[in-house]
Amino acid sequence: MITQKDKQFIKRAIELSEKGMDNNAGGPFGAIVVKNGKIIAEGFNKVTSSNDPTAHAEVVAIRKACDELGSFQLDDCIIYTSCEPCPMCLGAIYWARPKAVYYACTKEDAAEIGFEDNFIYDEIDKNIEHRNINFINLEREEGREVFKKWEAKEGRIDY
């Protein structure tokens, strides 16, 4: 059930999307992370202002929230975002493990203004040797040695 608080939180995410856009930080996207009914982190897109292609609103907000909580997971948190997350942000959200995500605009709305993500979904579905960017496997066995050490590591923190 959508509450009045949910509507207030999504409006804050939308406000942040406009704030970032007006400040020339990046694209028109904003996000917040809420825990126990309180905003613990906010973010807006900073891709162009920080020269960081990963500085999407959701990633910015997730990083701030994790720092605030002192955790790499967003247990019992909710993310409110001005737009349905792109594939990168979707991956970050699943790794952060919030309990829900509310979004305003759809990925189709984003595509209408030039933020098209379908090419990434298409790339994921391709065999690695048919992707548009070359992926070259090199020194796999040497790399696997570190994986074996991780597997045997005492006291590791799994995630």
Image: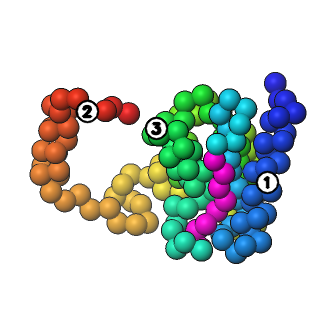
Q: Which class describes the residues within 10 Å of circle 1: few (<14), some (14-19), or many (20+)?
A: many
Q: Name the residue: 43% across, 66% down.
A: 132
**Residue 5, horizontal then vertical, whole percent:** 82, 34
Question: Tag 3 or tag 2, which sits nearer the N-term?
Answer: 3
- Nearest the viewer among 73 and 121 is 73
- Residue picked out by circle 2: 156
Q: Name the residue: 39% across, 59% down.
A: 130
**Circle number at residue 14:** 1
As helix, strand or loop, the secondary structure at mark 2 comes to loop
Whether residue 50 can be seen here: yes
Q: CA distance from mark 2 to mark 3?
A: 15 Å
Q: CA distance from mark 2 to mark 1?
A: 39 Å
- Residue picked out by circle 3: 71
Question: Tag 3 or tag 1, which sits nearer the N-term?
Answer: 1
**Residue 114, horizontal then vertical, whole percent:** 70, 68
Identify which amino acid the numbered label 2 is placed on: Arg
Question: Tag 1 or tag 2, which sits nearer the N-term?
Answer: 1
